Image (cartoon, rainbow, N blue to C red):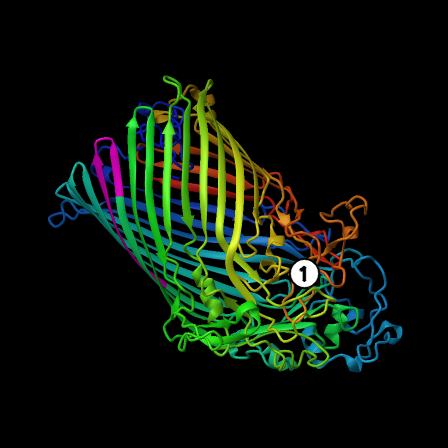
Amino acid sequence: TPFRGDASGNTAFGSADGFLINGSVNNGATSPFAQSAAFGNNRPGSRSLYNGNVGVILGNSAWDARPYSFSGQQSPKPSYTDTQFLGTFGGPIRIPHLIRNGPTLFAGYQHSADHNATTQSALMPTALERRGDFSQTLDAFGRPVEIRDPVTGLPFAGNVIPSNRITPQAAALLGYYPAPNVDATGRYNYQTPLLVATRQDSVQSRLSKAFRGRNQLFGNFAYQRTKTDTTSVFGFADSTTVSGIDTAINGSHRFSMFLTLRLRYQFTRQSTDVTPYFTGRANVSGDAGVSGNNQEPANWGPPNLVFSSGFAGLGDTQYVRNRNHTNAWNAESQWNHGRHSVTFGGDVRRQQFNMLSQQDARGTFTFTGSATGSDFADFLLGSPHASSIAFGNADKYLRGSSYDAYVNDDWRASPVLTLNAGVRWEYETPLTETLGRLANLDIAPGFRAISSVVATDPVGALTGTRYPASLMRPDRRGVEPRLGVAWYPVPGSSLVIRGGYGIYRNTSVYQSIALLLAQQPPLSKTASVETSATTPLTLANGFVSPGATSNTFAVDPDFRVGYAQNWQVSAQRDLPASLTASATYLGTHGSHLMQEFLPNTYPLGATNPCPACPVGFVYLTSNGTSNRHAGQFQVRRRLRNGLSATVQYTISKAVDNATALSGVSLSGASIAQDWLNLDAERGPSTFDQRHLLNVQFQYTTGVGVSGGALLDGLKGTLFKGWTATSQLTAGSGLPLTPVYLTSVPGTGVTGTIRADLANTAAGATPDGYYLNPASYTAPTSGRWGNAGRNSVRGPAQFALNAGIARTFSLSQRLNLDWRIDATNVLNRVTFANVNASVGSPQFGLPNRANQMRRVQSTLRLRF
C-alpha cells in the first residue's frame, strides 16, 4: 500500500538497530562499524568488485515425519531425497584493453528437486459389492441398504444383482478400482502413499549501465521450468510442465534534479503442458464401450465417475497444451516541485492466449442411487442420474489488450502532515478469438427462450441485437481514485495516524469467461443432462442422448468488471523497551462481483412452472456484492540485544452473495441454489477467517569483525553467530456449505442443492466430526434446502515453523552459512477440508490434512 509513509514521506516500517537477512552475514546485534569488510563488498584488492555465493539445500524422507493416515493404519512411507543447488555471481564486466568500464552483471541459477508425501485414504467397493452383492452393505447411518430393481420396482432377491445384469461398461471401468486394503470397519477401507515430485530450474540475470550521469539502461532476463509428477489414488501418474520467460528492458533519463523519465518494455511467455496418464496409452472409454465422448489419443482415459455416497470417484486430468504471451510498454515520469512529488505515467499490454485443451473431453457421470437406492448399484446397472460433457474447438487463439494511466501526488504539507492523492484509470478489452470462434446466448426477456449467437455472425435471432466480436460489451468505467494521509497529531510524540482509501479493479476476469464461450455449440459439443423416463441415460449412450441441452454456459453481454473499495485507518506509537504498537481498521466493499445461476430451475419434487422454458445452462452476471471489516492489532519489538519479534492478531468478518467470487466455473460450488432469490446466497465469504494470530520471533547471539564478540575463547566460539527463528500461525476455521449431491431438476448440474438443517436438537457432534450427521437431511420435497451457504465452520488452523542458522567467517573473502529449518515442527495434524455431502458415510469428517513435520538443511558459501 502506498499509504504507509510517515509525515515526511518516509517508509514507516520503524527504525531498527540492525537488519538481518536469513543466510547473510550475522551483524544484526553489532554496530555497523564492526562488520566484516566482506559485508557490503568493501574488500581490498582486484577482486573486491565481484561477489557471489554457491549453496545446497538438502532434505530426506528419513528426517520427515510419516504422513497422517485417516484410516488410523500406517501405510508404507515414501522414500525420497530433496535437493536444491543455487549459485549467484555479480560484478562489472571488464576485459583488459577492450572493455574498461562495462555494465554491471548479475547472474543466478537454481535447481531443486522437491517431494511432497501424503497418505491418501478412500472408500472403495468391497469384493461383494463388485459382484453385485449388497447383503452386507450399510448406509451412512449404519442401516442395511435395500437394492431395488429399476425395471420392476421390487427388491433384488437377497439384495444381490444378478451377474448378467452388470453392464460390460461398468465391469470394464470397475477394473481400475483397487481392492480395499485396510480394516473395512472404518469410514475408509483403502489407503495408499502418494508422492508429488517437483523439479524446477530457474535462471536470473540482470545488466545495468549508466551513461554520462543522466542516463541509465538496465535489463533483466529470467527463465523458469517446473515439472510436477503426481499420482492419484488409482495409481494414475500425470505430468505437468510449466515454463516461462520474463525479460525486460528499462531506460531512465534525468532531465534535471527535479524531473526524471523512465521507459520500460517487457515480454513474458508461459507454456503449460499437462499429460494425463492414459494419453496415447489406452483408450479406456472406447475399450469399455462408452460412446459419445472424445476418444482422440490426447484425451484417452476413463470418464469421470461421481458417487454421492462417498465412493472414490474415478477420473483423470484433462490434456492441456497452452502458450501465452504478453507484450507490455510503460512510461513513467517523476517531477519534484517544492513539497510535491508527482508521479504520472501509463501502461499498454497486448495479451495472447493460445490454447489446445478441452473443458470436459471424457465427460462426467453422476450416480445418486435414484434408480436402485444405491449409487454403486446404479453404476453396476449402467444407470447414471446425470451426465455432462464439453469438447470440440480444442485450439483457441484469444487476444486482448489492457490500458492504464495514472497520476499521483505525494505532498509533504507540513512536518507533521503528508498527503498522498491520485487517480488511476484502467481498461481491459473483452477477449476475442482470431477466427471468431466464440458463442453466447441471445436471451429473450425472462429467460423464456434462447438462441445461440456466434462471433462470426453476432446478431441475435431473438432480440435482433448486434453484439461485438467478443460477444461482451466493453466496460471502460475503470476510474480509481486513491487517497492517503499520515499525521502526527501530538508534537514531540511518536504517535502517527494513517488513513487511506482506494478503488481497485479486477483486471483478469475475461480469460476464464472466454474459454467457456469457446466451448459452446455450434462450435463444440456440450451437454448437461438428467435421466428421465423418455430419455434414460446409460453408461453406453449417456453422452449421445437426444435430450442434451444445446448450451451449458452464457454470460450477460453487459457484464461489468468488478471492483473493491478499500479503506483503512491506523494508529501507531512507540513504547518503552523498543516496542511499537499499532491498531488498524480495514474495510472493503466489493461491487459488480460475479454471480452464477441456473435459469428456470425449481426444487426437487416441485412442479415445473414453465415446461417450455429452456434449462440446463449456467448464466453469469455481475450483480454480486461483498463486505469485509477487520481489526488488526500488532506489537513489534525492534531488534535489541539480539531479539526481535512481532505479534499480530486480526479479527474480521467477510460476507458476500457473489457465488463465483473465486472464479468462473460450471461446478456446483459456484452456482446459486435458487435463481429467483440470489439474496439468499448472502453468507460468510469462502475466505472468512474470523480470528488469525501471527507470531514471528528472531534471536541472534551476534558476531563482530574476525569473530570478536562479547564472549571469547571456547565460550565465544560455541555461542557467537547463531540465529534462531520461529513463526506461528493459528486461526479459526473456514466456512463450509452442507450440500445434497444430486442434480438440479432438468439439468445435469450437481452440488448446488443445499441440505436441510432438520434437527437442531440432535445432540452433541460426535468426536472427530465437524458436522453432526444427525442434524442434516435431504431437503424437503418441493422446496430448496435451508442450510445456508457457508453456514458451518471447518477445522481450526495451526502451524509452527522454526529454524536455526549460523555464519562461519572463513576469511575476509569467504563466509559459510549453515541453516536447518523445520516446518510443522510439533508434527501436529490440522485438517484442510471436511466432507459436507449429506448421505456420504464420511459426512462431517475431515478428508484432507496438512503436511506433517518436514526438515531441510541449507549450506551456502559466499565470497
- Residue 430 horizontal/vertical position (percent): 39, 63
- Secondary structure category for the residue under label 1: loop
| Residue 390 shown in magenta | no
The residue that disc 1 covers is 753
- Residue 360 horizontal/vertical position (percent): 55, 71
Quadrant, the N terminus: top left
Q: Nearer the viewer, residue 558 or 311?
A: 558
Q: Nearer the viewer, residue 539 or 451?
A: 451
| Chief secondary structure of the magenta portion | strand
> Residue 19 appears in which quarter of the rendering?
top left
- Residue 647 horizontal/vertical position (percent): 52, 30
The answer, for residue 54, to whether it is visible in the render is yes
Q: Is residue 718 left or right of residue 834?
A: left
- Residue 442 horizontal/vertical position (percent): 49, 72
274 is higher (above) or lower (below) than 547: above
The answer, for residue 302, to whether it is visible in the render is no
Quadrant, the C terminus: top left
Q: Nearer the viewer, residue 721 or 844?
A: 844
| Residue displayed at 61% across by 55% down | 78
